[in-house]
Image (cartoon, coloured by chain):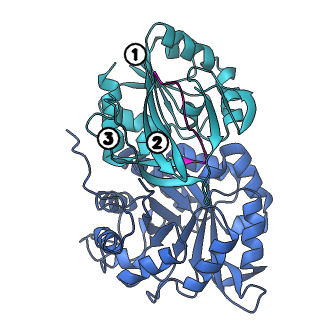
Amino acid sequence: MIAILDYGSGNIRSAQRALERVGSQVEVTSQYEVALNADGLVVPGVGAFGSCIKQLNSVRGDQVIKERLKVGRKTLGICVGMQVMFERSDESSDTGLGLLAGQVKRLSAPVLPHIGWNEVNTTLQMNLLAGIAGERFYFVHSYAALSTNKEVSIASSYYGETFIAAVEQGALSAVQFHPEKSGDAGLQLLKNWVSSI
Amino acid sequence: MTLATRIIPCLDVSNGRVVKGINFVNLKDAGDPVEMAAIYAREGADEITFLDISASVEGRGTTLENVRRTADQIFIPLTVGGGISSVNDVDQLLRAGADKVSINTAAIRNPELISDIVERFGTQVLVLSVDARRARTKSGFEVTTHGGRESAGLDAFDWIEAAASRGVGEILLNSMDRDGTRSGYDLEMIRKVRQICDVPLIASGGAGDLLDFERALAEGADALLAASVFHFGIYRIGEVKAALSRSGYVVREAHGVSEN
């Protein structure tokens, strides 16, 4: 069973339907135990970093994620749900979960938000992007992480500057774009993730 | 590695049905928005916009149901506009599966609504729809409401700056002079609005010729919305993208990935 953590952030119906489309049984939940014990946990997130972190913490989402990763349970952050995995963000004084080293910054580009379909590339073998590296995915964001630990597998994209579009670090996966809104390539990414569980 | 230009077909929906005629599919009546959205998605649309022009509460309910059905089947972004006048309206649409909402008249009547929506849901959900036409105002363009039938008594550029300062994710700039004419986007308006706004700019109103699309991009548009040219089957989305690609613009190819 895949759980989608419902902590009041955004449209999770699309993520639910997209996961169901690739054959998963999905439960939307804000229950600690359910989220902790699910085979896979999706952490969505839209809006501002600070309000996301506050809402996430209010359902003990921070603890759920950390506990899951300790025992190697697959967890996927999407959009701001990826950003909260880093140490902090320029957008807010609230601290992130610090599971990924580094900081989320406002992109340097003349037009923001970065909205639309952009290429995601990697030179590494990443499970998430198996068969779809170089495809375009749908982004909606103004902030992104530019760098992290060397040990973390990353895929990048470019908008004004190069930023991290996807990461894999052990059981933790995260994407800055919206796979649930990225057509066939996005569904394939979700399928890749689900298959890894 | 560059962001692709978005091509966005817009479906006018009334009481749950598409109201503009669509020739290239042989539907018995005006058209099912869910079916049309699926066709456009398959053809490579980068987003879909539903413009709800229902006058009745029942019509709005039907639209919500169509948003649900569309979001269940189509995994590309869906924007819904028309008749949104409260944070609760936005909440309902997002819960039904819309990714973004576009607001127009209600924001003019109550600019605070922009701030309220942004505070609750973030700027990324909000598309400010500006129906502008040429007039003797400061910028030479004024804002209209009710589908271009009434003047809002506002200079278009003053309004865009005021609204943008509250935080909108995108601006949908619709030329009421060109809407439905297929005589080309209002290039001067796009160029001038580009100079005063630093959020993505969606050009709308007047697309008729393949060259119209790249002309709008040359003036600084980030995305291109069109209705008639697609509904009447004058161009397929793929043809527009191929033409843009030949002229050196980056587009997302609709080759897809097999779903087996």
Q: Which residue is mark 2?
A: A178
Image quarter hosting the C terminus of chain A: top left
Chain that the image shows in blue: B
Tell me if residue B149 comes above or below residue B32 in the rendering. below
How many marks overall? 3
Q: Nearer the viewer, mark 3 or mark 1?
A: 3
Residue A146, image x, y percentages: 56, 38
Q: Report the mark closest to the observer, 2 or 1.
A: 2
Give the image location of residue B198, x and y in percent: 65, 63
Q: Is residue A8 visible?
A: no
The chain coloured cyan is A
Per the rendered image, the range of residues in magenta is A140-151
The type of residue carrying mark 3 is Ala
* Mark toward the start of the polypeptide (2 vs 3): 3
Mark 1: secondary structure: loop
- Return the residue nearer the eye: A67 or B88: A67
Magenta region includes residue A142: yes
Q: Residue at x 47, y 86 (%)?
A: B184
Q: Residue at x 56, y 47 (%)?
A: B94
Residue lying furthest top in this view?
A71
* Kind of element beneath mark 3: loop
**Residue identifier under label 3:** A133
Q: Are marks 3 and 1 in contact (CB under 8 Å)?
A: no
Element under disc 2: loop
Which residue does the numbered mark 1 point to in the structure image? A39
